[in-house]
Amino acid sequence: MDSRSPVGEARSLADVSAPGRVAGPEEGISHEELALAARNHGLPLEALRYDVTPPGLHYVLVHYDIPLTDADTWTLTVGGRVRTPLTLDLAALRSLPSVTHRVTMECAGNGRARLTPRPVSQPWLVEAVGTADWTGVPLRTLLAEAGVEPDAVDTVFTGADHGVERGVEQDYQRALPLADATAEAPEVLVAYAMNGAPLPPQHGHPLRLVAPGWYGMAHVKWLRDITLTATPFTGFQQTVAYRYRQSADDPGAPVTRIAPRALMIPPGFPDFMSRTRVVRPGPLRLEGRAWSGRAPVTGVEVSTDDGDSWAGAELSPPDGGVWSWRHWHVTWTATPGPHTLTARATDAEGASQPLAQPWNRGGFGNNLVQRVPVVCL
């Protein structure tokens, strides 16, 4: 056991579960962060070739444990500020009209490990993303059947995963404002299938929430309860975690929708350790994916000189829908020597990726441009 582990002297949950912190100037990745990186995983960037991410390649972040679930006995309850509380098993849910939406999902902490100073948590680089076809029942259908009371303001979602975080024992819970929960577009789903098959255990089997455009913390997995409240939800994952804070005592603004991002499929072939790419001289197709949870992506620019100059890339039609990534490509004539390739996305609201990332204590919403070092030989 790591000598710094608090377990041997633990007297309370607070002794087991440390507060959030920022790494020191010379502090490397800890054993605890490596353990998180081992149990969670990102998308191998070469898998950006797929329009729809195979489930085993889609990014995974699990706060606590993957719970043991039984689809035959699972029920979803809908209650709180509703006229008719519901208890639905999977057969009842599957009997309701279903829809399928292609949705790009990204972890709010994507890019955290590239910040200086580094927030201590799951050490994502840029790979915490994936796109799937999610099938299920529109949330607004369930809420209409339950009959929402006029004083309801928040819709609270509870998962079956249970743990402790910063000294607080909890079931994982998040909320959406009622207006977002009942919107026709983007339409929130109670999903039971991923890419045409039942949800895998790590993706929320047998039920999960899918909230298009929102960072991954809103897509509650192993969904077992939906409660309408007459007051804003103040649970840990809503008001303590997932806030843009500059200091420990800063209340911060809430993390909500996905900032625009473009990622490049790494060209050529890689060195095993450094992942530096090797390419050959001559014309080379550079391509990747771009998305935003705030507005449709309208443009992608590519730089082959680390941001000194930019050229527009060609965007494919948004065949997957508004809340799915778009393919882009451009041709570059590679010349011998080292190069740094960069891509940045812009959405319909005019938001674009920064070249220097503003810092926040949780490492959230870091959509700093990706830089891909290549050597042309």
Image (spheres, helix red, strand yellow):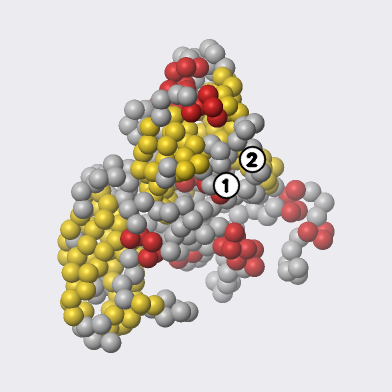
Q: Decide: marks 1, 2 in contact (CB < 8 A)?
A: yes
Confirm whether residue 257 shows in the render.
no
The N terminus lies in quadrant: bottom right
Residue 278: image x %, image y %? 33, 81
Q: Which residue sits at x=52%, y=62%?
A: 123
The residue closer to the viewer here, 229 or 208, is 208
Q: Which residue sits at x=48%, y=59%?
A: 42
Choose the circle earlier in sequence order: 1 or 2. 2
Q: Which residue sits at x=75%, y=48%?
A: 13
User: Which residue in the structure is indicated by mark 2?
Assistant: 69
| Crowd around label 2: few <14 · some 14–19 · many ≥20 (10 Å) | some
| Crowd around label 1: few <14 · some 14–19 · many ≥20 (10 Å) | some
Kind of residue sitting beneath label 1:
Pro
Quarter of the image where one finds residue 293: top left
Question: How far apart are the two marked residues, 1 and 2, measured between alpha carbons?
Answer: 8 Å
User: Which residue in the structure is indicated by mark 1?
Assistant: 201
Regarding mark 1 in the picture, which secondary structure is present there?
Answer: helix
Classify 90 as above or below 287.
above
Kind of residue sitting beneath label 2:
Thr
The C terminus lies in quadrant: bottom left
Task: Give the residue at the far top of this rendering.
Answer: 83
